[in-house]
Amino acid sequence: MNTASAALTPSIFGNNNPCNRRWMDISLPHSSPPPGNGGRLFVTRATSPSSSAPETDKKKKGQRNRKNKNKEQDEEKQEDENMQVSIQQQQQPVSSSSTSSVSAIKSTLDEVNPVGLGRRSRQIFDEVWRKFSGLGQISRTTRTDDDETGLLMREGGPMCEFAIPGAQNTTVLVVGATSRVGRIVVRKLMLRGYTVKALVRKADQEVVDMLPTSVDIVTGDVGESSTLRTAVEGCNKIIYCATARSSITGDLNRVDYLGVYNLTKAFQDYNNKLAQLRAGKSSKSKLLIAKFKSADSLNGWEVRQGTYFQDAVVAKYDGGMDSKFEFTENGDAVFSGYVFTRGGYVELSKKLSLPLGSTLDRYEGLVFSVGGNGRSYVVILETGPSADTSQSKMYFARISTKVGFCRVRVPFSSFRPVKPDDPPLDPFLVHTLTIRFEPRRQKPVEGPIGMKQDLRSFQLILEYVKALPTGQETDFILVSCTGSGIEPSRREQVLKAKKAGEDSLRRSGLGYTIIRPGPLVEEPGGQRALIFDQGNRISQGISCADVADICVKALHDSTARNKSFDVCYEYVAEPGKELYELVAHLPDKANNYLTPALSVLEKNT
């Protein structure tokens, strides 16, 4: 007997004698079975006490039986009604308890059920992705700043799967943020946790709606240097995606050349200002080794002559050699002369006197601002104890100049020992700088047809010599072009302005990365293999999304520092024009395809 039947028996019948009970089988609804006895509830029902009393008188017995029979029928009817009421009262809590138990079991099974788990995970993922996609969309949304800030800072940073170490402490200025590449660059930077500033010429409603709400919009004109001070404040890196909207020469020079020059100068001035506040010197500033601005600046420089070998028989037929270093009336320091002697050379040398506390091991290389008639020279560095030159070791690197003024970068890594057994160059031990001219290996410069050139004479105008600051990462990323896809009528003008901007960036002293993509196409990125090349040999296009991805990856890639390269989609090169590096496929966000592609390319090109 279960607990329910035991409770019903004494309360309804008031008779605990098991001999006077009979059983009734009551079926409950299938929807709410009580626990313990399947789907049935058993209750006890007692017989009437009068039915067991003996009667001696048959007449009285018959009358009494009739009365008792009628009375029993009435009592049984009343008892059945009472019992049904009691059963209904007992059945209600049982059904309620059973229903709640079943609901709890179903809920537990739903949590354990893989289908239920998958449904819940999809709901959570869809909700999170909706918020993230709203954050990164180009068009402006109506979310509040508090919601956006909470979304960015949740779980240790924005899009933790996409986040880049150090991105939250890096502010990137995007110039040309509304351009085809710039819009995608802004979105990628935000999804990776960078603080983004956008430099726009006019902050009208159409421009504002194209940028996400968390972007700091700054108005300014790259052609006006005075408007750029506010833009560079607080920035750590710059991505320059701006390009002239017309082929007018004035617009090309203003955006592609002066824009780069003004921005690099403003960025350097800002870094120098921060360094002065720290009572130090900016790590991005060049170290001045020599500046030729007066006749006194020529003091300490020595002109020397020599030959690689002596041939007494041939020497009497040589025309000799001569050279001089002077400060002209035009205010130029000119090193000039000629070398007609076989195996002869002339050179200009000086012992370095660096500022107190400065050593060249903190710098990456040298930059020469020179002019002249386009000859090539040999730069020689001497290392070792300055008091005893007999123990000095010599290292050399060849440089080429152009007709007119140019700036030539010479990284310390390009210097080779004169004696192969000597160790690599240690910039810390450098004490003497020498510039040497020799007639061999000279090549004619471009000029009018029929112009006579004597490759044994030279003229070198020196403006300054500086040391380039070292660094692990790039500071300025410039999106240039290869010229492919540009109308032939305006190609020369565009390339001239682009190259002038590239040259101004190289001589700025900032760590740079110059990306020259092929013709830009509007299609998803990461779908086709890429080719990285140097030498203006590519002709295929590339998607804007792929160019933007390269810009973002180059921010913290040490192999991208001081590199200039072309990039386009994969294609079959012509014989004899094989390419530097082929990346099999643009991988996902976790795979760094840029490092192996750029590691084989040359620096300072």
Image: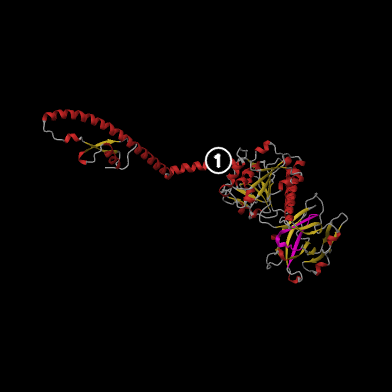
206 up-or-down from 342: above or below: above
When asked about the image quadrant of residue 334, the answer is: bottom right
Q: Position of residue 411 (x, y in %)?
A: 71, 58
Q: Is residue 208 visible to us here? A: yes
Q: Is residue 371 magenta?
A: yes
Count of numbered tags: 1
**Residue at image x 35%, y 36%?**
92
Given residues 385 and 139, the one toward you in this image is 139
For the N terminus, the image quarter is top left
Q: Position of residue 315 (x, y in %)?
A: 82, 67
Compared across the picture, whether 421 is left or right of 302 comes to: left
When asked about the image quadrant of residue 131, the answer is: top right
Compared across the picture, whether 277 is left or right of 591 comes to: right
Residue linked to disc 1? 130
Please provide the residue range marked out in magenta: 356-383
Compared across the picture, whether 455 is left or right of 58 comes to: right
